[in-house]
Structure formats: C-alpha cells, structure tokens
Image (tube, rainbow, N blue to C red):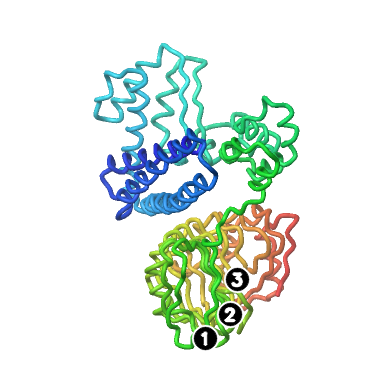
Amino acid sequence: MAAALVSAIIQQLATIAAENARQEFKLVTGVKKEVQNLESNFKAIQCVLEDAEERQVVNKSVGYWLERLKQVSYDMDDVLDEWKFALQKLETETDEVDGFCVQMKKKIARAILGGLDQDSTNLQTLQNVLDKICENIESARFLLVLDDVWTDRDEDWQALRATFQQGMPGSRILVTTRKESVAIGLGSSPSQMFPVKQLSDDVCWSILSQVALIRDDDELLKSLEDVGREVAKKCRGLPLAAKTLGSLLREKKNKNEWRNVLNSEFLTKQEIVSKEFNSSEGESLHLSSQLARHLRITIGEGRRFPMSINRVGKLRSLLAIGQKYDVSYEALQSLFNEARCLRILEFGIGYGYLAACVKEIPEDIGKLIHLRYLNLRFSYDLKKLPKATCELRNLQYLNLSGCLSLEELPGEIEKLINLRYLYTRFCHELKYYPKGIRKLTGLRELDIIKARIDCNDPRVFCVGDLENLDLLSGALDLHMEGNTNLGDSWEEEVKRAEFQNKVLLTRLNMTLMLEGRSAEQDIKNNVMQALNLPSNLHPHWW
C-alpha cells in the first residue's frame, strides 16, 4: 500500500511538471526543478518500499524509509503550495488569466474530443473543437466525467455547457469538486448535488481490517477488533488514512503490536524543538536538528530575539514567548530570508507589556508565501506593515490588536484573498481602514472597523462596503464617521451594508462620530432603520 501511495504521488507530480512545461508562463522560479527533484526522491523511496513489502523486512527498516517518505512529503507540500500561490497571484492579473483560461478550455475540449474522435485532435481553434464535439454527440447519449474541478467562473464554462446541450436526451455530466460554488456555477440544483462526507468510524474500520488481511480469520478479527476500532478513529474519516494504516498493520498479528501503532506519535522529537534564549545582544541560536519543523523559543525578560537562527530552512512554525523582548529589523530580515516554509509566526503570546516589541518589519516578509498565521499583537512601536505583506496570499489570520502606534493598514489588502480573521482592536492611531477590505469576502471575524457614511475618499472603507462580508460571525465594533449634512445619501450608504444577511453575527457595538449638526438621537433612529438588522442581532450604542 505504501508503494502504491508513492506511485500515485509520482503520477501527480509528473502531471504537474508536464502541465508546467506545456504552459508558456513560469509559475514560480525553481518550481519545475523542485518538482523533478521530488519525483526522483519518491521513485527512490518507492523502490525500497516495494522491496520492503515483498521481502517483509523488519519494522525498523520500514520505519526508516517511512520516515524519509514523511520528510519528502513535507517538501512536496511546500512545492505544491508554491504552485498554488503562483496561480492565485496570476488570478489578479486579468489579461494573463483570460489567456490562461482560453488555453485551459481548449485543452479540456481537445481531451474530450480525443475520446470521441482521435483523428480530430489537431484542430486549432476552440470553436472548431467544440463544433466537432457537437457532430460526435448529436446522435448518441454520453456520460462525461470531470474530476476535481476548481474553476467556478461561469464564463469559463459557457461554451462547453452550450456544446453538451446538443447531446441526446439521457446524456449526463458528472463533476467532482471540493467547492460548492463550482457545482452552482455549472447550473446544478440542490437535488443534483451530493456532498461526500467523511467516512464513519465503522466504515474506516471495515477498510482497515480488509487491507490488514484479518477479516478472513474470525478468531484473529475478534481479538484485535477493540484496539483496531480505536486505530480506525485516528483515520478521521479519510479512506486513504484507513488504507495506509491497514497496510502498516498487515504483518502485525497480536494486540500489543496493534497497540504500539495506536499509541505512536505522529511527530518525532526531532521535529519539535524548544529552546531558551537569554542573550542581551541578540547573537545566534543554533539548532541541533536539521529536521526541525516546529520551534518554540522562550526569551528572557528584556532580552533580544536571536539575530539569526541556523537550520530553519524547513521550519513550519515559530512561537516566540517572553516578556518585553526586542525583535530587531535585522533579526526579522535574517529569519524571513532563511525560513521560507513558515506557516505560523507567533510574537503575540502574552498580554500588554509582556508581549514582544516588533518595531519595523522588512519587505522580505513577502517571501513567506506559505504563511497562514501572523500574530504581532501589542507591538507598541509598530507604525505600519510593509507593502509586501499583501503578497501573503495564503495568510488566514492576522492579529494587530494593541499595536498602539499603527497608523495604516496596507493599501492593497484585498490581495489577501484567503484572510479569515483580522484583529485591530486598540490600534488607536489607525485613522481609517482601506477600501480593499470589502473584497475579503471570506472574512469570518473582524473585531472592529471604522467606516465612513459619506464616502468622500475612494481609499477609505465605507459602511456600504460591508455589503458582501456575510460570513462575519461573533461580535463586531462598528465606528461610523461622516457628514450627515449631505442629504439622504448617507442613509442609502448604510442600507447598502445589507446587515439583514449577516445572520452569523451575535453582537453589534456601534458609535457615531458626526460632522453634521443633526440631533444625535434622530440620527441613531435613522441608522437603525437603514441597517435592517436580523432579528437575532441586537445592537449596542456606545
């Protein structure tokens, strides 16, 4: 099973490399080379795994190669993450995206035509290919399967959809996707969509026991079932996990061996590193393990964050804990240039004066394209984030709470297309919020925001820009500012926020800072009418 798993991964990598070669744009510098390197590593490991399974070698040997497989899988994940990042970046460049989409539609159409008429795959234009498909299906019923579809733009599917409407009655198209928006975009009704849920523990146990080759031995099955079901729970409903664990257990025929698997740790001690650092000069921190993936640094009070840390090239998370310690610009520059695989960067553990002191962030932060989580809260002296922060398209969590000197957020914040959590409470010097926040439609939590009701500045977030942020949940502090002597336009702006659709919000705290001379209570009453809040959301005025 392990060999089969690696074989599947090799095929996936080969497909990606081939796609990259066929396209006339370069996704990320070095990605193609890295994919080829990973493919070579996987092939080497596959040979050993096949030999291990055939000869039934001892567990220590298998464990060694499985450990190598895990390390290489980390690298594969990094490269594929870079590939995905490049595609997301490309999506912001309209002309290139349109050209890419035309090529992809032509490729899909040619692949379909190849299954119908192998002699017609040399047609040059997309329309010629579509016309030929029409000729082949107009007198026959067909079943077309499109697997793992990600494109949800309606315009990308219009031509193909129109083509396949020419087929005979009874024809069907089956699409598998991880995005509900794809199914909706293809015109599927709710009754035509079948969400595939995670497998139950019982089904995982059934798969695991079949792969482990114990179902034909009733006595063995009975003796191992209780611990086997506990192992199945570790699969978390994933069939591949059930198959992998089943393969691992195939040669283990007693309960103690199964319990060892149940109690085994996923991460090795070498991967999790905890260090104490008490240098007043910042100096360097040396890690003994080249396999370090997760690093926790405890820094003495009033000390400095390390000027450099060696062996952090594979690091995925870094948590710095301490009291009133300085993090210099130079130290961050060194970290960002070395730890390119970071997913989590935590400087905010503590409260108030106990937190880190990050004063300035270098533009090199844009190199951390894998970063998902960034916590800088209570960095008192931080005045702004560099423009390169907006290149972190994988960023999901950004905490700037308590950054008392923060004067502005990045103007191109709309590029953070995966941002889910944005916290800026106690950022008292923050004069306005950028308008680009309105495009972050995936936001789940936004603790506070200032919004204009008069929309005089195209850079500034307005109340109506909340219109499409319907996934917001929890509590929201809404500080409304503006001039109410401009007629009724401000009421229309408030209505545009569409608060009736924000059913996940549980609390709305509001303030008004008005430049007009209208009576404050009258304005509040008009605001309440214009907001049209859902029945479960009760406002609180400050």
- First in residue order: circle 3 vs circle 2: 2
Q: Which residue is mark 3?
A: 480
Mark 2 to mark 1 CA distance (whole Å): 9 Å
- First in residue order: circle 1 vs circle 3: 1
SS class, disc 2: strand
SS class, disc 3: strand
Q: Which residue is mark 1?
A: 303
Mark 3 to mark 2 CA distance (whole Å): 37 Å
- First in residue order: circle 2 vs circle 1: 1
Residue 337 percent across, percent down from the top left: 37, 69
Above or below residue 406? Residue 175 is: above
Asked whether residue 401 appears in the rendered view, the answer is yes
Q: Which residue is mark 2?
A: 322
Amino acid tagged 3: Met
Amino acid tagged 2: Gly
Q: Is residue 419 left or right of residue 367?
A: right
- Callout 1 crowding tier (Cα within 10 Å): few <14, some 14–19, many ≥20: some
Residue 271 percent across, percent down from the top left: 52, 61
SS class, disc 1: loop
The answer to whether marks 2 and 1 mark residues whose Cβ atoms lie closer than 8 Å is yes
Closer to us: mark 3 or mark 2?
2
Q: Which quarter of the figure is the C terminus placed in?
A: bottom right
Q: Is residue 429 left or right of residue 22?
A: right
Q: Residue furthest top?
A: 139
